[in-house]
Image: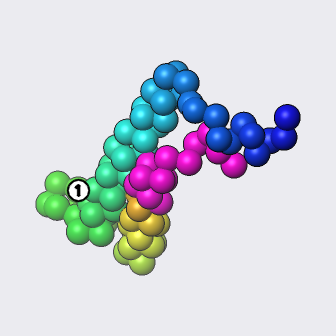
Amino acid sequence: MALEEFEHEPMSEHEKGMIRMRSITNYGMGAFMIVAGFFFMFPTDYTSRFINQYDPFLIKIFASICWLYGGFRIFRGYKKNYYRN
C-alpha cells in the first residue's frame, strides 16, 4: 500500500476531535498574541509603568513579532492541516 492511499482514507472520530481541539487552541493563542501585541504597542496607564523601563524600539519590534505570530497561529487554525504532510 502506497502512502498516497492513506491520505484519502476518512478520518476517525478521534482524529476529527483532535483537529477541532487544535484548531480552537490555535485560534485562542492567535487572538491572545494579537491582543498582547496591542498592549505592547499601545500601552495603557497601568502597563506603561512596566513597559517604559525598556527600549521603545525593541518593544515595538516585540509587538510586531506578537502580531505576526498571532496571525500565523490563526492561519494555521484556519488551514487545519495537522495529520497530513
Tally the marks.
1
Does the stretch in magenta take in 79? yes
Quick check: 62 above or below 1? Answer: below
Quick check: 6 above or below 80? Answer: above
Query: Residue at the spot x=22%, y=64% of the render?
Result: 43
Q: Is residue 73 visible?
A: no
x, y percentage for residue 27? 36, 47
Instruction: Report the amino acid beneath label 1.
Output: Thr
Does the stretch in magenta take in 80? yes
Name, please, the residue furthest toward the right.
1
Neighbours of disc 1 within 10 Å: few (<14), some (14-19), many (20+): few
Colour option used = rainbow
Q: Name the residue nearer the viewer: 41 or 85.
A: 85
Query: Which element type, helix, strand or loop, lies under badge 1?
Result: helix
Q: Name the residue nearer the viewer: 62 or 49.
A: 62
Query: Residue at the spot x=45%, y=27% of the render?
Result: 17
Name, please, the residue furthest toward the top.
14
Query: Residue at the spot x=37%, y=39% of the render?
Result: 24
Quick check: 71 above or below 10? Answer: below
